[in-house]
Image (cartoon, rainbow, N blue to C red):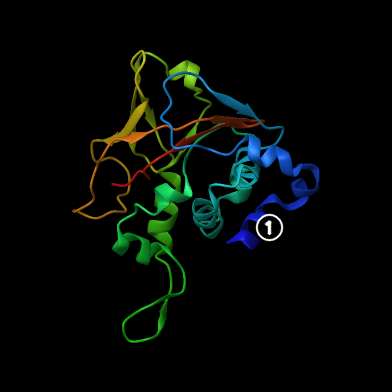
Amino acid sequence: MHQSRRALLGATAGLLAAPAFAQTATSNMPVVSGQSQVRQTNVVDSLAAAGNFDAFLEYVSRAGQVEFLRGAGPFTLLAPTNAAMERLPVTLRESLNPNQVNPQGSSTSPDRVRLQAFVNMHIIEGRYTLAELANTTTRLRTRNGNAVEVVSQPGQAYNTRIIGDSGFGVGGVNAELRPTRFIVPEIMATNGVVLPIDVPLIQ
């Protein structure tokens, strides 16, 4: 996993000082007001530098979305932390992860269609910062075609969830549609913004 993060950093790795990693570490505190960190690189390399998104970055890489997210954008990336990724249903995780070993002892390949849909479910084209989403209800569209609703009220956590049944579903008929909270801090990148979340979006 750590090798994947180093690979994603690429040429940027030599420019990022180790103390800066600690400055952008996410906490589990929900966002109740604008709290930002600024990075002088794109959303995916900013995510790699933050150091708490290795599991999601592995999915991004295997879905072939790294170079896309290094593009001009702008993008809003709803990024599940490592702890959030542990909340994925086991059966879904097994279908998305590579080289899973089944009960017969042989390895399986990831479901690439569902993998790409899962990653695209967390990418929104356009830049939507916490300040822009504050104190209102906003509906956005993911690259997977899902409608996402972000709800923010003064003094309360920002919550988001998928609404309706648009877009390709990855969780199956038993997918649990539970609200997801933004957690601090948001990460401002050169081609968009990263909004860390405490539960992955699934449908």
The quarter of the image holding the N terminus is bottom right
Q: Is residue 74 visible?
A: no
Q: Nearer the viewer, residue 6 or 169?
A: 6
Q: Secondary structure at mark 1?
A: helix
Q: Nearer the viewer, residue 139 or 155?
A: 155
Residue 152 lies, with reference to residue 52, above or below; the image says above
- For the point 46% across and 18% down, which residue is it? 33
Q: Quadrant of residue 36?
A: top right
- For the point 24% across and 55% down, which residue is it? 172
Which residue does the numbered mark 1 point to in the structure image?
A: 7
Q: Quadrant of residue 49?
A: top right
Q: Is residue 114 left or right of residue 98?
A: left
Q: Is residue 201 visible?
A: yes
- For the point 66% across and 53% down, which residue is it? 8
Q: Nearer the viewer, residue 170 or 99?
A: 99
The 10 Å Cα crowd at callout 1, few under 14, some 14 to 19, many 20 or more, is: some
Q: Quadrant of residue 153?
A: top left
Residue 11 lies, with reference to residue 155, above or below; the image says below
Q: Is residue 117 left or right of residue 103?
A: right
Q: Is residue 141 left or right of residue 177?
A: right
x and y, in percent, of residue 175 in the image: 23, 51
Going by the numbered disc 1, the residue's amino acid type is: Ala
Q: Is residue 14 left or right of residue 90?
A: right
